């Protein structure tokens, strides 16, 4: 079972439905105990970093997320859910993320429209060994809606150009994250989610 963490933020059903379309047993989960027992975990997120971080902690699902990651359960963060994997964000300096990935979420460069709300080219480059991005054409079109993105670190597996190179995805071990929305990125996005589903199947076999 893949738990899509339901902490009361935005439209979470699009990720759930995309996974179900691929044949995965995915469901929205708001119970931390059930989430901790999942074979795979997806953390979506839309809106402001600080509000999402607070809601995740109020729900108790932050504990379940940390437990799953600590157990090596395949884990995917999407959009603000991806940003929550980092230590903090310029959007809300008083807030804190889960600190699973090192680094800070930064505002997109000046001189470009905020938010980036468009299809953009995903540039995989040195991330072609990524388990999540396996088989994805380089470059590929994916869909973004965001004004902030994690800074580029050794965990970055792809970028897009938007006033400069912007982190589009990252991974460390069984933890993956995408700044773009795979559930809204057509066949390319479904292929990325299918890679995640396969990773869950292998890990739970």
Image (cartoon, rainbow, N blue to C red):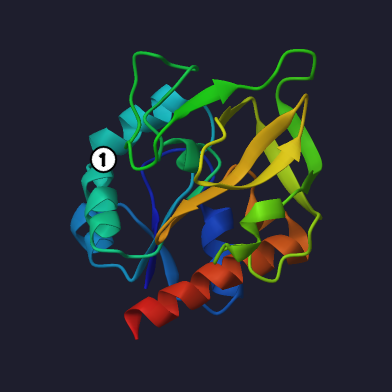
**Residue at the image point whose x is 22% and y is 42% from the top:** 60
- Vertical side of 156 occupied by 161: above or below: above
Is 29 situated left or right of 162 in this image?
left
Along the viewing direction, whichever of 45 and 169 lies nearer the viewer:
169
Residue 201 position within the rendered picture, expressed as x and y whole percent measured from the top left: 43, 80
Q: Please identify the residue farthest to the bottom as the structure is shown.
A: 205
Q: Work out which quarter of the rendered image holds the C terminus and state it.
A: bottom left
What residue is at 67 percent from the left and 66 percent from the top? 190
Instruction: Work out whether 174 lies above or below 151.
Output: below
Image coordinates for residue 130, horizontal then vertical, percent: 57, 62
Say whether residue 76 is visible.
no
Residue drawn at 34 percent across, 13 percent down: 94
Mark 1 is surrounded, within 10 Å at the Cα level, by few (under 14), some (14 to 19) or many (20 or more) other residues, namely some
- Residue 195 seen in render: yes
Q: Secondary structure at mark 1?
A: helix
Between residue 130 and residue 23, name the one nearer to us: 130
Quarter-wise, where is residue 20 in the image?
bottom right
Figure label count: 1
Among all residues in the image, which is located at the extreme left? 33
Q: Is residue 187 above or below residue 4?
A: below
Residue denoted by label 1? 59
- Percent position of residue 102, x then y: 39, 36
Q: Using the rendered view, name the quadrant where residue 7 is placed.
A: top left
Residue 66 in percent (x, y) is at 25, 49
Which part of the image, by quadrant, shows the N terminus? bottom left
Q: In the rendered image of this protein, does residue 8 appear above or below residue 40?
A: above
Q: Residue at x 75, y 49 (%)?
A: 123
């Amino acid at each position: 079972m893949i738990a899509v963490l339901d902490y009361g933020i935005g439209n979470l059903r699009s990720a759930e439905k995309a996974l179900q379309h691929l044949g995965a047993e995915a469901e929205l989960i708001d119970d931390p105990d059930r989430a901790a027992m999942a074979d795979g975990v997806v953390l979506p997120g839309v809106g402001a970093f600080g509000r999402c971080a607070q809601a995740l902690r109020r729900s108790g699902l932050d504990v379940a997320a940390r437990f799953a990651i600590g157990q090596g359960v395949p884990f995917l963060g999407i959009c603000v859910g991806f940003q929550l994997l980092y230590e903090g964000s310029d959007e809300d300096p008083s807030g804190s993320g889960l600190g699973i990935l090192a680094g800070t979420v930064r505002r997109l460069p000046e001189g470009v429209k905020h938010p980036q709300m468009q299809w953009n080219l995903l540039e995989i480059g040195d991330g072609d060994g990524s388990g999540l991005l396996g088989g994805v054409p380089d470059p590929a079109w994916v869909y973004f809606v965001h004004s902030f993105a994690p800074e580029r670190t050794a965990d970055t597996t792809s970028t897009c150009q938007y006033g400069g190179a912007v982190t589009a995805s990252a991974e460390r071990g069984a933890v993956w994250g995408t700044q773009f929305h795979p559930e809204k990125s057509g066949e390319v996005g479904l292929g990325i989610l299918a890679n995640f589903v396969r990773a869950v199947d292998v890990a739970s076999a």
